[in-house]
Amino acid sequence: MTRILSLVLAAALTLLSSCGGDGTRTLHIYNWTYYMPDEVITAFEEEYDCDVVIDYFSSNEEMFAKLQAGGGRGYDIVFPSADYTSIMIKLGMLAPIDHAMIPNLQYIPDIVKQVATYDPGMEYSVPYFMGAAGIAVNTTLAPPDYERSWMIFADERLAGRMTLLDDMREVMGDALKTLGYSNNSTSPDEVQEAARLVADEWKPNIVKFDAESFAKSFARGEFAVVHCYAENIIAEMSAEELEKVDFFLPETGGSMYIDNMVILKDAPEKELAHQFINFIHEPENYAIFLDEFSFPPTTNTAAAAYMETTPLYTAEDLEGYEVIADLGEDLDMYNKLWEPIRYMD
């Protein structure tokens, strides 16, 4: 009897000392690869006496397909981009955001709210970061007079040494902007013209469409030019190696993204998920995220004061860039034009 009472007492003490007083909690996150500093995760686990488990995806399509197939059961927070956030809201996949639990929403800039037309009141999503994919050039492998625009992919001198992102909306959007159109155009003529630009002038010079391994290959010197997200390149290269890299956002404009933090409707740990979102937007914590990837402080008004690095690009560089929007039924038009480009030689 004494042994049984001791075991019961020990179990009770364990429950009282764990996160929330009701047992150790685990937050399950589904995020982009290379998009969350370990330091921030560790700090959150320590502060809330919890565990954080992260799975990764390399494209919105991959993430959405997994959730639709039922593979996302158990996830609490997911990080979709603007267009897929819009789709998930319309499909009723998300839980409402309790603003009272996230006081750090005060640091989300008005400009971000204004362009987040899919959820301007942050009813179902909280912006994580607003930025854009750009171009990284290994200056030791490229000719000195390369063009700092999307038309670098038409440069035959670099044929066989370049990659484009395996992302239809990014690539087609950048082609549309190069032609002077909106990256969310629904004009059949404009979209077809953009498809011809990619198929006839860009694709012949690239090795492949790649959204997963391009950073590692670029770091090894296998490619001279890659269409990329800055954070991937930074994660794979040392400070010394980065000195030979020219990362830029073409002045013609391109596709801009807002990646969001959303809580799934059936999330097991909704309270902890709200606490995590608030923790991320604590200015000191958000500055760690920005420093990790040399990002500009576009999405938190107070984080700049705590930053220690110089961003690879600035908020001003995003002028002329448009957020990738949900195209609705017009997405089929893009898909039909993209499939022969992406999947046929």
Image: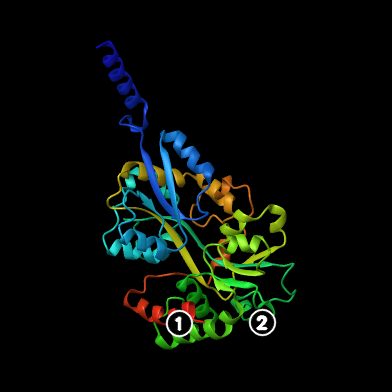
In 3D space, how far apart are the residues under numbered discs 1 and 2 (Cα atoms)? 22 Å
What residue would you read off at disc 1? Answer: 340
Place of residue 130 in the rendered image (x, y in percent of width and height, measured from the top left): 48, 60
- Please tell me how crowded label 2 is: few (under 14), some (14-19), or many (20+) other residues with Cα within 10 Å: some
* Image position of 130 with respect to 186: above or below: above
Depth order, front residue of 79/75 = 75
Q: Residue at x 36, y 60 (%)?
A: 66
Residue 28 falls left or right of residue 1:
right
Residue extending farthest to the bottom is: 189
Q: Residue drawn at (64%, 76%), measured in percent from left and top? A: 160
Which quarter of the rendered picture does the N terminus lie within? top left
If you read the primary sequence from the N terminus, does the residue marked by circle 1 or circle 2 appear first?
2
Determine the secondary structure under disc 2: helix
- Report the residue marked by disc 2: 156
Occupied quadrant, residue 148: bottom right
Type of the residue with mark 1: Pro
Q: Position of residue 165 (x, y in %)?
A: 53, 69
Considering every residue shown, the one lying at the far left of the view is 1
Judge whether residue 133 can be spotted in this image: yes
Report helix, strand or loop for mark 1.
helix
- The spot of residue 21 in percent (x, y) is 32, 29
The image quadrant that residue 221 belongs to is: bottom right
